[in-house]
Image (cartoon, helix red, strand yellow):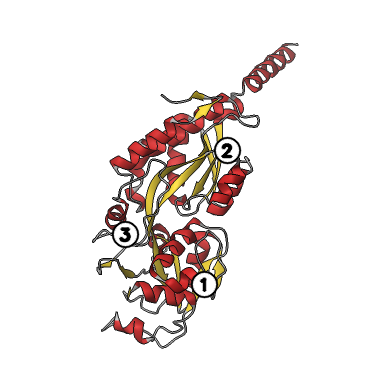
Amino acid sequence: MKNLVVCLMAAVVLLAIASTGIAKEQELIGAGATFPYPLYSKMFDVYSKEYGVKVNYQSIGSGGGIRQLINKTVDFGGSDAVMSAEDLKTAQAPVLHVPTVAGAVVVTYNIAGSPEIKLTPDVVADIFLGTIKKWSDPRILSANTGTKLPDMAITVIHRSDGSGTTNIFADYLCKVSKEWKDKVGLGTSLNWPTGLGGKGNPGVAGLVQQTPGSIGYVELIYALQNKMPYAGIKNKKGNWIKPSIASTSKAANIALPDNMMVSLTDTDAADGYPVSGFTWILMYTEQRYGDRTEEKAQEVVKLVWWMAHQGQKYAEPMEYAPLSKAAVEKAEKLIKSVTYGGKQIMK
């Protein structure tokens, strides 16, 4: 009899929790960019331990994150690409782009001995267009006097999935190469003229490591974690720049629009790395949709606010550029614009 009473009391408690929505409010679901995934993993682990809210983030690529946000199957998306006009229209409601950090997309390669190499913008574009086919091409050698490069074929490695990293890289190539802009263009998914596809930053990094003579593009942390070499790129001011926190921060030091939907590529900064970009958390401005509760909306807002503030201290140790003071202020305004049933969530 005593056991029956205990079981009944436990059932009543569970029903009470379910009816108030407390149980399901302890987990937030996100999906999207692989670009910031190493950092987000750290952030979400810390946040869970500090606040008791689990954040389940699937690194499926920016294109997938955007699709899941539009389908309303996640609480937030992650993207290194600004949503297209078509995607914003399909969403049928305003979507905020809240910046979290800036990062560098590096050109990594697999050459025996891992020599340090330098590449000009036109050479990068022509390699990925398939026009430059060998490491011994005179245009590569002219920028790398004294560096021994092999007379072997170049194998291009690119993303096979919808990718914000691809969008940043293609955005840069569109700015420095008319041929790229005309033939390939901009987007998270491209009709590649040459090469092999890998899924996610990890997939591209893995294929480059497995393929002698290959070249690809990944976020800086993936090259560092895998001890892969990456090229110095000549920027708009004619300076050879290696990707780093400092050179990424220089690229991000620009006038920022209120909506933070801005490109950082091909920077005018003399010391700025030219293939840099923000990564964003995507969320609906109005959080009352479907069966979402106000508590769930509040938890999402608290998380994103934490990422733009306390979470910033985890950026530099993982080779991402933290938000500048100006970028944080823009992010604050965006987060404070989030509503539930028309009522401002954070004041």
Q: Is residue 223 left or right of residue 90?
A: left
Q: Amino acid at mark 3?
A: Thr
Q: CA distance from mark 1 to mark 2?
A: 33 Å
Where's residue 11, x and y in %?
Answer: 70, 18
In this view of the protein, which residue sits in the foreground, 219 or 174?
174
Give the label, 3 or 1, closer to the camera: 1
- Residue 335 in percent (x, y) is at 43, 33
Relative height, residue 28 to residue 17 (above, below): below
Q: Which residue is mark 3?
A: 267
- Three-letter amino acid code of the residue under disc 1: Lys
Residue 314 x/y as whole percent? 36, 44
- Per the image, the residue denoted by label 2 is 93
Q: Residues within 10 Å of mark 3 (few under 14, many from 20)?
A: many
* Identity of the residue drawn at 57% across and 28% down: 25
Q: Earlier in the sequence, mark 3 or mark 2?
A: 2
Tell me whether the residue at label 3 lies in contact with that at label 1, contact meaning CB atoms closer than 8 angstroms: no
